[in-house]
Image (cartoon, grey):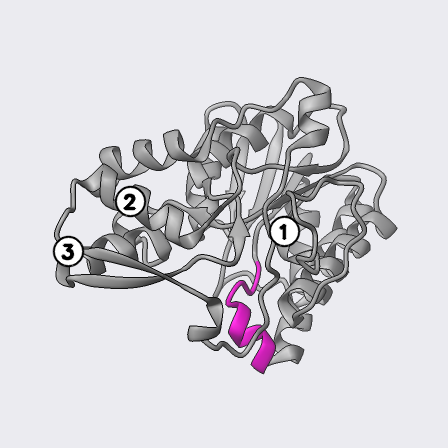
Amino acid sequence: MERVYITGSKGMLGRALAPLFADECEVLATDLPESDIRDRKLIEEEIRDFKPDQVIHLASLTDVDRCQLEPEAARETNALGTRNVALACRKTGAAMTYLSTGMIYNGRKVEPYVESDPPDPINVYGRSKYEGEKAVRELLDRYYIFNTCWLFGGGAEDKKFVARTLKQARDKTELKMVNDTFGSPTYTRDLARALRAVIGTSHYGRFFCVNKGCVNRFQIASEILRIAGIKNCRLIPVSSAEFPLPAPRPRMEALRNQNLEALGFDLMRGWKEALEDYITSTLL
């Protein structure tokens, strides 16, 4: 039976992905506080003792503004922590999966990014995640790097954009929503299924994996209210300048799954269908 070691298993994607391997594989799902990827010796010992065939590295410091304010913490987790996992994989011969982000780009492109576009991160989070990508490519031959963005999911524990917008729209008569930054909203269940289809195959490399589409937050919020049948809350489109944040955001984060398309492995549906599925099956 194949063995799979997962970091960051308590996160939104980890909770969706781990069960997909559990039926066919022996899974060791790890997370803080017991397992800390910043501790090179600990991670090396855990991976060596478990002897996994696949290491799926999801653990990350994803708070973009905290990363900007605490750059060393971002580097220790996202760059050096990823290097620690990659080094352990090199020593044990395990293949490695690394989850990265669309925020490794500067956002100046007017259309979604593809895998051949040159990275140029404009904030600490993006730089730290890109450093993680480089470590994986430098140290390993057998790896899968998946770049994604604007994740939603989590159900009752969801505190991110979709669930937060739904709650606010029920409580308020109007909401301001940014309309000048763009991404590809991605459902963690869809992402997990797509990763499961690729991990374990011989198709190593770097892949973008998002639900199809390029939209702004105002458009997503409009769809959330439509799906939930909320009619007494007015959405007001505004510039991102109205919500100044510590970390600059790229104007364009949206991605296109070009490499998965080329392999015939693109299982991702449109963002509207995925969003409606999530809201109607989980949040309502």
The image quadrant of residue 35 is: bottom right
For label 2, the residue is: 224
76 on left or right of 155: right
**Mark nearer the N terminus (3 vs 1):** 1
The image quadrant of residue 4 is: top right
The image quadrant of residue 174 is: bottom left
For label 1, the residue is: 102
Q: Residues under labels 3 and 1: Cα distance?
A: 31 Å
Q: Quadrant of the N terminus?
A: top right
**Mark nearer the N terminus (1 vs 2):** 1
**Measured from the top left, where is residue 197 in percent x and y?**
59, 24
| Residue located at (24% from left, 33% from top) | 281
Q: Are marks 3 and 1 in contact (CB under 8 Å)?
A: no
Three-letter residue code for mark 3? Arg
The image shows a total of numbered marks equal to 3
> Which residue is outermost to the bottom?
69
- Residues in magenta? 60-69
For label 3, the residue is: 170
Q: Indicate yes or no whether the magenta region holds residue 63.
A: yes
**Measured from the top left, where is residue 137 in percent x and y?**
83, 48
